[in-house]
């Protein structure tokens, strides 16, 4: 009987070791699938005041914000940097809608759309008659609705009118709905590839929350998806993007943290300055553009990201 027990115990231990080994191998495979060992972060431009909100335009250029510089810049692959718009309402997050029009969250308390002819349309600036705080980051759903966060960054406490910091949905018919007001500092925002999950970073709580997206576009089942600890002077959870496999990339202490769809840490891209936001770009959407401090960086990865405004998603 003792021999049988010992045999069973030894067998169980062997199975446990093999399972652990396989788990580690799976994690390693996941990391190598995302980023080659020789992939390097490359600086593209510097000298900005505070870089944010990158978005790649499919015609072949990068747009990004300089919030205190009150400017949206255009960077082309030949290294040329030019002013796309100035003044720009102290712009922060940018994305594209399904017609490839620029959607911008602005610290002058507005959500705007840049029309094809260059005209600026204000989509939202008040909720129930009160001014928004400071629209921060933005993502467009495949049905054309726009989800954005509204923390108080960019305004003084005495300027706040709402008394909370929300996550909103703007519908193409012009309706603005409050989806959540329970987060402390809602910031970066991104959908899962199937749009059944919405990720929102909280820059003060140092974590990412995930919500279920209901058929009517509302949010339920809020829970912590991942924690991003570390010295806050090296960066906090802020801008966030998702690749086509559902991996989540979020700014955090020391660089860009990469999580699996289940919230497991896969890797971290070390960046010299505190990361503010991210964007997939180039023709294959395998280049990750990174805004950090006063600079713009990029790194080549192996899995393409979700393309803003992509009607085939």
Image (spheres, rainbow, N blue to C red):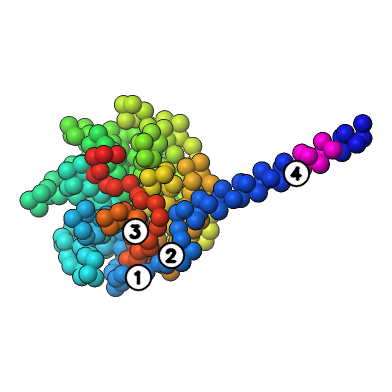
- Between label 1 and label 4, give the one nearer the viewer: 4
Q: Is residue 56 magenta?
A: no
- Quarter of the image holding residue 73? bottom left
Residue interval drawn in magenta? 7-14
Name the residue beneath numbered marker 3: 287
Name the residue beneath numbered marker 1: 43
Q: Tell me the SS state at disc 2.
A: loop
**Front residue (pair 300, 278):** 300
Q: Tell me the SS state at disc 4.
A: helix
Query: Residue at horizontal 47%, vertical 42%?
Result: 261
Classed neighbour count for the residue bearing mark 2: other residues with Cα under 10 Å, few (<14), some (14–19), many (≥20): few
Name the residue beneath numbered marker 4: 14
Name the residue beneath numbered marker 2: 39
- Quarter of the image holding residue 143? top left
Q: Earlier in the sequence, mark 1 or mark 4?
A: 4
**Front residue (pair 251, 23):** 23
- Between label 3 and label 1, give the one nearer the viewer: 3
| Discs 1, 4 touching: Cβ within 8 Å | no
C-alpha distance separating marks 3 and 1: 13 Å
Q: Earlier in the sequence, mark 4 or mark 2?
A: 4
């Amino acid at each position: 009987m003792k021999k049988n027990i010992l045999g069973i115990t030894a067998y169980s231990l062997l199975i446990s070791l093999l399972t652990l080994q396989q788990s580690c191998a799976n994690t390693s495979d996941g990391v190598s699938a995302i980023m080659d060992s020789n992939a390097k972060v490359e600086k593209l431009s510097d000298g900005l005041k505070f870089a944010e909100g990158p978005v790649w335009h499919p015609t072949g250029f990068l747009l990004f914000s300089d919030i205190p510089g009150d400017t949206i810049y255009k960077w082309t692959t030949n290294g040329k940097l030019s002013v796309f718009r100035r003044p720009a309402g102290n712009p922060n997050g940018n994305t594209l809608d399904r017609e490839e029009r620029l959607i911008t969250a602005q610290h002058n308390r507005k959500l705007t759309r840049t029309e094809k002819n260059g005209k600026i349309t204000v989509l939202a600036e008040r909720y129930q008659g009160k001014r928004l705080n400071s629209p921060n980051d933005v993502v467009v759903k495949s049905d054309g609705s726009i989800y954005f966060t509204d923390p108080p960054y960019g305004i003084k406490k005495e300027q706040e009118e709402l008394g909370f910091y929300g996550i909103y949905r703007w519908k193409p018919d012009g309706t603005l709905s409050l989806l959540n007001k329970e987060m402390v500092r809602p910031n970066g925002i991104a959908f899962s590839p199937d749009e059944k999950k919405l990720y929102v970073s909280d820059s003060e709580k140092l974590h990412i929350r995930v919500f279920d997206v209901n058929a009517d576009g509302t949010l339920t089942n809020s829970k912590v998806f991942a924690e991003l600890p570390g010295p806050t002077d090296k960066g906090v959870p802020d801008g966030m993007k998702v690749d086509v496999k559902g991996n989540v990339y979020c700014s955090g202490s020391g660089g860009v943290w990469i999580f699996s769809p289940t919230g497991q840490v896969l890797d971290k891209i070390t960046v010299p300055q505190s990361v503010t936001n991210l964007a997939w770009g180039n023709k294959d959407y395998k280049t990750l553009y990174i805004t950090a401090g006063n600079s713009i960086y990029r790194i080549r990865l192996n899995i393409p990201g979700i393309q803003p405004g992509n009607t085939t998603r």
